[in-house]
Amino acid sequence: MCIRDRRWVSEIVAWATPLPGRGASSPVVLDDRIYLTAYEGYGIDRRAPGDAGNLVRHLLCIEAVDGSIVWQKAVPAQSDKMEFTTWGVALHGYASSTPAVDKTGIYIFFGETGVSAFSHAGDELWRTNCGVGTHAFGAGNSPVLYGNLVIANASVESGDMIALNKSDGSEVWQQSGINRAWNTPVIYRAPGGSDELAVTIADKILAFDPGTGKPLWNCDGIKDYICPQITVQDAILYASGGRSSKMIAIRSGGSGDVTESHRIWELAKGSNVSSPVYHDGRLYWAKEQKGILYCADAATGELLYEERLDPTPDRIYASPLLANGRLYYTSREDAIYVVAAKPEFELLAHTRMEGDDSIFNASPVPLQGGAILLRSDKFLYRLKPAS
């Protein structure tokens, strides 16, 4: 296998900002500011995790141009119930939820500590509890914004989907029965022009009206816990997940049980953790173990390639990024693999971040001009545009 590009880190990193703690959350960008979460105080040493009451999460605001920290706010845990397990939460930690940001503020979801809203000056505006449940896998669903609503999948905390008012955190609607769903809901435009919110739970894919919470339709899904977020393109939903690693394609719209009428295809190849990305009629994704990459025809589910990365990486939990005509796959311990975004497998580059032996769980994020943000447990990096 020929790798055309193996550049030194110093040639591709514009800046690297040290972080106050670990985290699997991805950076999110609004205008010239980056928002990111991290945690410290508990669960750092696997042999001696410490006292859960000392857990503190952080929200950071960072300048996109030079990586300087504009402000940093601490959010202490509200209880000492968080269970540390070396096989579960230790793999991603206690800051796995990516913030949701718009002009009205920054919205974060920290499990049993609740959903919080911050101003762009760094002031906490409100905090709403969404349940006190915890799980050995931990939590990590990210909030989504819709109009004047902040919507959170609180499957771990309460088994509910909860919509809160952006202005004060008051509850607008709630739907129960969100079972074993470690994925962030997705909002999209359905045929006919109406908006839908969909989430994958154990055994089912559910769709709701995001404004009211009214159930719209359901479809038989994957019989397991579900981590990957649904990918949507042209009103088609691509749902993956489960230890059996399946992929299902479903037409959106309809009402009631649409299993027989709207399921398009099912493929016995998927991912248990990361989400697929769509490009030019094809889906691309990585199996979380063994470094296997896949490409499939989005219309038919036909598998176009199944290739193992070389060198074989550690687990891949981050979702791939499509940018600059390339796919960026980030492994937990073996850095970044860059693959051509085409139906024939071609590995273009493999870059290790020298001097950073920490874990890379977060999905990379594009910036205007072709730069990319990459987050580890130690640093936030701005990578220069691909040449």
Image (cartoon, rainbow, N blue to C red):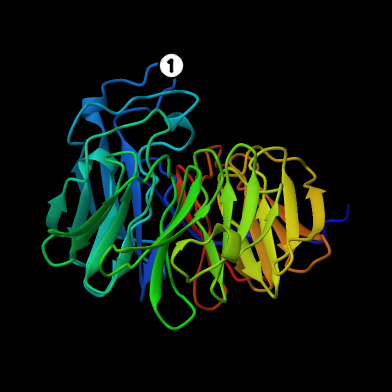
Is 164 or 117 nearer to us in this picture?
Answer: 164
Instruction: Name which quarter of the figure residue 76 lies in.
Output: top left
Q: Position of residue 316 (x, y in %)?
A: 61, 44
Residue 207 vs residue 271, the one in the foreground: 207
Residue 213 vertical position relative to residue 227 in the rendered view, above or below: below
Residue 261 horizontal/vertical position (percent): 58, 65
Residue 51 against residue 343 in the figure, above or below: above
Q: Pick whichever, 238 or 337, lies toward us.
A: 238
Q: Residue furthest top?
A: 47
Position of the C terminus by quadrant: bottom right
Q: To which residue does mark 1 refer?
A: 47
Left or right, 142 with respect to 351, comes to: left
Q: Is residue 244 left or right of residue 139?
A: right
Give the residue at x 64% y 38%.
244
How busy is the neighbourhood of tag 1: few (under 14 within 10 Å), some, or many (20 plus)? few
Secondary element type, mark 1: loop
Q: In the orientation shown, which residue stands out farthest toward the bottom?
A: 192
Left or right of 377? Residue 329 is right
Residue 321 appears anywhere in the view: no
State how many labels appear: 1
Expressed as whole percent of the image width and height from the top left, the position of residue 97 reads 37, 49
Residue at the image point whose x is 54% and y is 63% from the top: 231
Hey, what amino acid is under mark 1?
Arg
- Which of the 4 image quadrants contains residue 383? bottom right
Residue 372 visible? The answer is: yes
Q: In the shown orientation, is residue 15 left or right of residue 301?
A: left
Q: Residue at x 71, y 70 (%)?
A: 299
Q: Position of residue 352 (x, y in %)?
A: 65, 47
Q: Is residue 297 above or below residue 192?
A: above
